[in-house]
Image (spheres, rainbow, N blue to C red):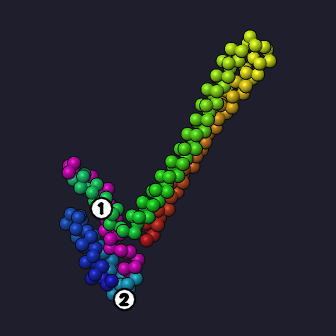
Amino acid sequence: MNRAGYMKELRRNLEALPFEEREAAISYYEEYFDEAGPDRETETIESLGSPEAIAAELKADYAVNKPPKTPREGASKVWLVILAIFAIPIALPLAIALAAVIFSLFVALLAVIFSIGVAAIALLVGGILTLVSGFGVIATGPLTTLFFLGGGLALLGIGILFGYLSYIVAVKLLGAFARLLGRLLQRVKARGKSS
């Protein structure tokens, strides 16, 4: 692709922008090519990336940076961002796959926390029922009563321990998951700026 083809493709991809914004972007990239010179045209095209990616970024920037004056304009800006996302054909499948992996990790994390919490509740309920049973068998003998009371207290203790464990796991794992997502977003932003 040469400069003329690149600029034609960029202009075509920027048709959704208002005339002033579109012309400002086109003149900026024309100047960019002028400064690079005709002998560095291919290098300039490679450094800029695809016209679709530039147009998508410009549309998203326009939609985000210019506050809408009417609800209709706000809706059109949302559509611009959505179209900008779908304008990058390679990035979209990767983004969907990444989102699916992140979602499945999050669901698995919640399942682990939920299962530890359910185990804690089951142990607490079992401990309470065993204690109540211990008081119910007082007439059968002191050893049986002590066995049931001790078992009930042990189950209550383990249930409290599991409850505390589920709280700790929830706080630590969800915090680690949030930090992981933050690092991932920083890497994605850094790659977007470098390309």
- The boundaries of the magenta stretch are 44-72
Q: Please tell me whether residue 129 belongs to the stretch shown in magenta.
A: no
Dividing the picture into quadrants, the one containing residue 152 is top right
Q: Quadrant of the N terminus?
A: bottom left
Dividing the picture into quadrants, the one containing residue 41 is bottom left
Instruction: Give, as a three-letter code, the residue at label 1.
Output: Leu
Q: Nearer the viewer, residue 69 or 136?
A: 136
Q: Could you classify mark 2 by the number of other residues whose Cα lies within 10 Å: few (under 14), some (14-19), or many (20 or more)?
A: few
Who's the residue at 19% across and 66% down the image?
19
Instruction: Give, as a three-letter code, the residue at label 2.
Output: Asp
Residue 53 x/y as whole percent: 35, 69
**Which residue sits furthest right?**
143
Give the side of residue 167 with respect to residue 149, left or right.
Answer: left
Q: Is 163 above or below relative to 169?
A: above
**Which residue sits furthest front?**
140
Residue 17 x/y as whole percent: 23, 64
User: Which residue carries the number 1 mark?
Assistant: 83
Q: Nearer the viewer, residue 3 or 129?
A: 129
Q: Is 177 above or below relative to 47?
A: above
| Numbered-mark total | 2
Secondary element at image label 2: helix
Residue 91 visible:
yes
Q: Main secondary structure of the magenta part?
A: helix
Precedes in sequence: disc 1 or disc 2: 2
Q: Nearer the viewer, residue 78 or 153?
A: 153
Residue 169 x/y as whole percent: 61, 42
User: Which residue carries the number 2 mark?
Assistant: 39
Who's the residue at 76% across and 13% down the image?
140
Q: Please tell me whether residue 56 belongs to the stretch shown in magenta.
A: yes
Residue 182 visible:
no
Residue 79 x/y as whole percent: 27, 57
